[in-house]
Image (cartoon, grey):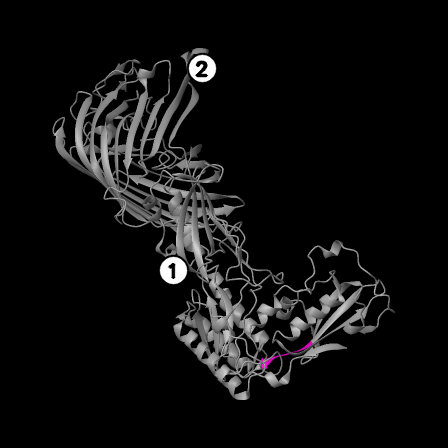
Amino acid sequence: MHSFAAPSHLLSSSTSRQLPPSSSSSSRAFSRFTTIKCHLPSQNPKPQKPASLLHSISKPLVLASASAATLLIRVTPISTILSGAGGDNFGGSGGFSGGGGGSSGGDGSSGNFWEKLFSPSPAIADDNNQTQEWDSHGLPANIVVQLNKLSGFKKYKLSEILFFDRRRWTTVGTEDSFFEMVSLRPGGIYTKAQLQKELETLATCGMFEKVDMEGKTNPDGTLGLTISFTESTWQSADRFRCINVGLMAQSQPIEMDPDMTDKEKLEYYKSQEKDYKRRIERARPCLLPMQVHREVLQVLREQGKVSARLLQKIRDTVQKWYHAEGYACAQVVNFGNLNTKEVVCEVVEGDITQLVIQFQDKLGNVVEGNTQLPVVRRELPRQLRQGNVFNIESGKQALRNINSLALFSNIEVNPRPDEKNEGGIIVEIKLKELDQKSAEVSTEWSIVPGRGGRPTLASFQPGGTVSFEHRNLNGLNRSILGLLTNSNFFNPQDDLAFKLEYVHPYLDGVYNPHNRTLRANCFNSRKLSPVFTGGPGVDEVPPIWVDRAGVKANITENFSRQSKFTYGLVMEEITTHDESSHISPNGQRVLPSGGISADGPPTTLSGTGVDRMAFLQANITRDNTKFVNGAIVGERNVFQVDQGLGIGSKFPFFNRHQLTLTRFLQLKQVEEGAGKPPPPVLVLHGHYGGCVGDLPSYDAFTLGGPYSVRGYNMGELGASRNILELGAEIRIPVRNTHVYAFAEHGNDLGSSKDVKGNPTEVYRRMGQGSSYGVGVKLGLVRAEYAVDLNTGTGAVFFRFGERY
């Protein structure tokens, strides 16, 4: 049997140990908008040339598509081949660094056995050697052959590789951590020299007191390889320390002259011990919490002697915490102070040394961007700035923040190793800007019933929308937006709506941490008034259209990601029209004779059909909702106040206020992740509205409709000065959608009579009502069956969007 054993006269009482990359792998899913995958090194890493920390990062990209309003994050992990030098390679107390054998192990020159293990050497066969020709061993089958008995001119194919633990007297499985160390692979083709080099590498790595290699011949001409070993051990430890050695200068070890005297060797070992102690003192504490510290200490006390397997178990425990917390660049690189009462775990956590922002054209070439860099930098979380440890969560947050600017078609966050700072990370942010100017035209056809209720060729009306946008003016995310909508191009004057808006973010300056945005717009809109709607059993009420034209300016201030405050001034002219587009100062009624009477409730405050007014408007929103596997959970609160200034027709002075509270209660805890089912959710909703002072009919609160009390038409329950709406809905996930049941109630609190002309009584409405029903979500459409409790009848409705 061909074997190697480490020389026994070079035993070390203390060595430092560097471990290979972890064999674990993990992937995490966050929200339905983001997916982050971090593939850690495989269980059997390919031997590579030792290099600096984070030797290779296989294009770790974080992508976002602003145009699609969808965020996809892909972080392809950081594949690291770590090597130590200088202080890393020497133990603490004891001052001796020995050869590969004995109870201490370690290489006498550097103590870095993992570097030797993964160094390129003739023992490493090409990955594609399975396709090469190989030679039969030419020996009788089922005999054990020593390595030195093999021919140096043949290429042997290995059918299997076994590890035999002499101390446990058993064959270890492929899940054993020692399999990480072997570069040979079953099915590989190797020469005798390559096998001898592999054995020499294993024997001098410090992991084994003794290691042997022998082959067993197979009838098909291949060899089965068995590696038998005795694992190295160190004395027991009862203390554990974790230090961050990232960004620390690596001093090169001084080779020990073999002709040194014993005194010179002792001085050499003592100097190495002092160097390592100074290294520990200069290192920073790691982020590892005390809970993990206690877990490692418990393992150390239970296991007794420190072994190579135990060190690998500690490494996996430490790295598992880092990767679970999103520190994808963190790696355990070394263990020191072995053969003392304290084990020192050296971690490179991935400190950010530089943040680089690049703009790219559509072909990926680096160009000078239009967007000013402070606009991007203010969106980055503090955890992604220089001096912090890189975390996937902070990268994800940066993507969401930058994507919310709506300035870029593609966003990449790429952490890469800093070649000038050992263990450092440079975070690159690559951006592709959207075109500054855009325009869009959409058309639609509507069918208007003709005589007898049947459509005719002339009743087909073409309509559409024209929009344009000039974004990112001066590179400061300022923009001008225009929108023109008409439902009948044949008679555009009948229904022409427009909106022209200017958006000015960073009102206090781009360097000011406060994010206030100014919006100023002029508008013209037309909507059908739900105030003039008939109740049950009432003949059709002639419609009243409300046209609003004016200007509006407001400022929005974000207190946090969940809270914002908007305040501003509105000046508008309100005109009410009948279905013939004539100004209508009063609502209309159908007489028993079939004629129409225009003596209904007044439509405006002035009584002329035209009102002008100015008022202040404020709105505060707190939205703590989030998505759990596609289902909304959390809470949303909205409070809005409109304050009349006494400026305009009849000097309107009023205070109109609304409060909306909605709770999305998660009824069952579920595992979050891509493809996981959403939880059932109970929705509780309450809405109160009130007005003190002047109240024109077009601003009265209406009850009934898909966003008030379902099962009724818009305004079918009444128009009032005060309202209270209550609702509950339970959502049950079914396959890729959900079904739900709901119950709702609306009440005018007896205030309908306080609206001028009392339109609720004139059009025979109840002033209150309840409903219940069931529904199913079909994409963007809600299909519902709702029962109106006022009449006891039910109907099927199809609605777009969400009720809550």
The segment highlighted magenta reads: 229-233
Looking at the image, which residue is at 40% across and 70% down? 285
Which of the pair 51/254 is nearer the observer? 254
Q: Residue 497 carries which label?
A: none
Q: Nearer the viewer, residue 707 or 473?
A: 473
Q: Which of marks 2 and 1 is in front?
A: 1
The amino acid marked with disc number 1 is Asn
Q: Is the magenta stretch mostly helix, strand or loop?
A: strand
User: Residue 388 shows which numbered tag?
Assistant: 1
Residue denoted by label 2: 455
Residue 620 percent coordinates (x, y): 26, 45
Left or right for 494, reference 227: left
Secondary structure beneath disc 1? loop
Amino acid tagged 2: Pro
Indicate whether 371 appears above or below 190.
above
Q: Which quarter of the figure is the N terminus placed in?
A: bottom right
Any part of residue 653 in sight: no
Residue 279's spot in the image, x, y percent? 43, 74
The picture places residue 788, in percent across and down from the top left corner, at 38, 35
